[in-house]
Image (cartoon, grey):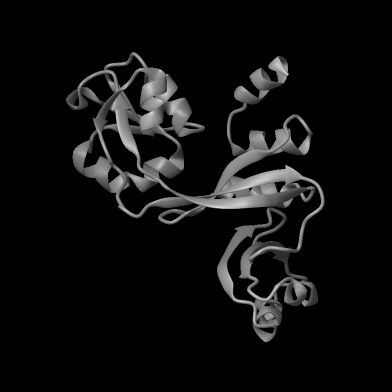
Amino acid sequence: DEVRDLLIGALVGIRAVVQALAEGRCEAAVVPVENSVEGGVTACLDALWEHPELRVARALVLPIRHALLGSGPISGISEVLSHPQALAQCSQWLGEQLPNALQLPTSSTAEAARMVAGSRFRGAIASLQAAREHGLEVLAYPVNDVPGNCTRFLLLRRGERQLQGPLASLAFSLHANSPGALLEALGCFARLGLNMSRIESRPSKREMGEYIFFVDLELPEGNAPLEQA
């Protein structure tokens, strides 16, 4: 168990976490799938499509409040490190407060906090908890551009999918790129009274113009309409 904990703790990035779950190296995984400001987390969507043996056990929406962390004064910050999503969610604030600072992407906000510890010219966009864990000062808080910023997280497990619950998450591709093909596919949801709360597309990576569609459906009347669809 100790070796496994060390292995999982060393994983870098969403893809590595999902891969570890798919290979049975952990029992479950929590990954971000969608942000209210920046949209879908592409690494998570691609990983879910690549691993059909995984299922969504739970979903949870949490408010996101970013902080600028560091070990020196904010006036001396010349590099800001964080996950690309966090940098994007704070782009306006960074442009106004640190316009000359170089923005460097990292695998996670926690990794950014670890990397700037002890540096007087580096800052990290991360959480208040990360500041406590790495002994960093909170130079500014909150720094996210939108006050209502929130992220939806998924609890993933291996095993057979369930068709019960208030929400269903689906992914599908089309047989051909032809006029009305997507409309025809989505029409079955409308005819069965299934409301789409989210739709997003990602390149299939097979050829230009071919996409995979991710859809969330509300299931207020049980799973019978979903089975028919």
Q: Residue furthest left?
A: 75
Q: Position of residue 197 (x, y in %)?
A: 55, 69
In the depicted structure, whether residue 66 falls above or below residue 79: below
**Residue sitting at 73 percent across and 50 percent down?**
55
**Residue sitting at 31 percent across and 27 percent down?**
69
133 and 91: which is toward the camera: 133
79 and 115: which is toward the camera: 115
* Residue 126 visible in image: no
216 and 175: which is toward the camera: 216
**Residue sitting at 74 percent across and 71 percent down?**
223
218 and 86: which is toward the camera: 218
In the depicted structure, whether residue 28 falls above or below residue 59: above
Quadrant assignment, res 163? bottom right
Q: Position of residue 3 (x, y in %)?
A: 71, 16
Q: Position of residue 12 (x, y in %)?
A: 59, 29
Q: Position of residue 95 (x, y in %)?
A: 25, 43
**Picture quarter with the N terminus:** top right
